[in-house]
Image (spheres, helix red, strand yellow):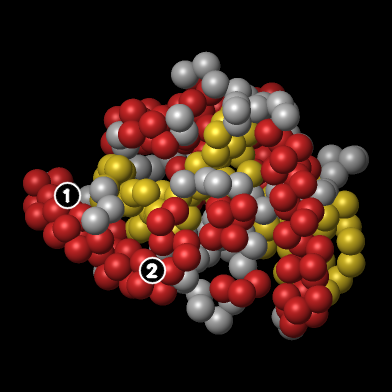
Amino acid sequence: MVKSLMIQGTSSGAGKTILVTALCRIFSDMGYSVSPFKAQNMSNYSYTTKKFEISRAQAIQAIAARTQISSLQNPILLKPLGNYQSSVFIKGKFFKKMYAKNYYENFVLKKGMKLVTESFNELTKSHEILFLEGAGSPAEINLQQFDITNMKIAKKTKSPVLLITDIERGGAFASIVGTMELIEKKYLELVKGFVINKFRGDLEILKPGLKKLQKKTGIPIFGTIPMTKFNIPDEDSIGYSSKTISWNSSNLKKLDSEINKIAKVVKSSLNIRKVEKLLK
């Protein structure tokens, strides 16, 4: 039976994309057949072939998983055009240009959820483990009813959730507690652990805070990932990567090396045994 795990964040830029990338490589190294999956991504950074176009992030994650890059891994891609309008791609093909209001009210829940579920189910036919990536935060209360990239798809696919936060920004503990407070109550049981990302300094100083967080929420911390420099292209406009990269053998070799680097850091920082138990 195929197992899945979802990585959600307390905000955009918390580290979801890189954590999924690292987990894809770690579990591929462990001998599992792995694939990434992100129901909906908003980015102008894409991976394009003659047959389909998906988010660059999911293409890189597929490379990390050592699996074929597929339009199923990112069934909905939104490429922002400005003025609240985006080009909508469905399973790698251009669908239409839509304004946000029309997209949310007339597409997401009627057609969107159906096609992302179909894509997920199709991927399960050829993989043992799927690592799902959420988008933004599951606590965006103005959009929760239309959010098919976080808790709705986690529930639909029976995927346990790890919540990652960026401690470098400050307010990481408040971000976790606040996120848990604003997640719809019916989804709270899906959250199985927290991950602290981009930590600098002495871990011993952090430990009292981790203990208080676990006591307050009743949810364990799966690990603290140190701030690490690596050269993996950013997912979207939060970062500073070029919008285009060449997918030639030389660049892919460099990318593979950077994936191994971040996977090594995550493997040494995260309780992989606990992660694997969530997938049993």
Q: Position of residue 264 (x, y in %)?
A: 38, 28
Q: Which residue appears at 29% of the width and 59% of the height? A: 167
**Residue type of the residue flagged with mark 1:** Gly
Q: Which residue appears at 26% of the width and 48% of the height? A: 220
- The residue that disc 2 covers is 179
Q: Which residue appears at 57% of the width and 73% of the height? A: 144
Residue 58 visible at all = yes
- The residue that disc 1 covers is 201
Q: Relative to 53, does residue 268 appear above or below in the rendering?
A: above
Which of the image's four quarters has the C terminus?
A: top left
Dots 2 and 1: beta carbons under 8 Å? Answer: no
Residue found at the far top of this picture:
31
Q: Position of residue 31 (x, y in %)?
A: 52, 16
Which of the image's four quarters has the N terminus?
A: top right
Please name whichever residue, 163 or 136, is drawn nearer the observer in this view of the structure: 163
Task: Give SS at disc 2.
Answer: helix
Q: Relative to 263, does residue 53 appear above or below in the rendering?
A: below
Q: Which residue appears at 9% of the width and 46% of the height? A: 204
Task: Give SS at disc 1.
Answer: loop
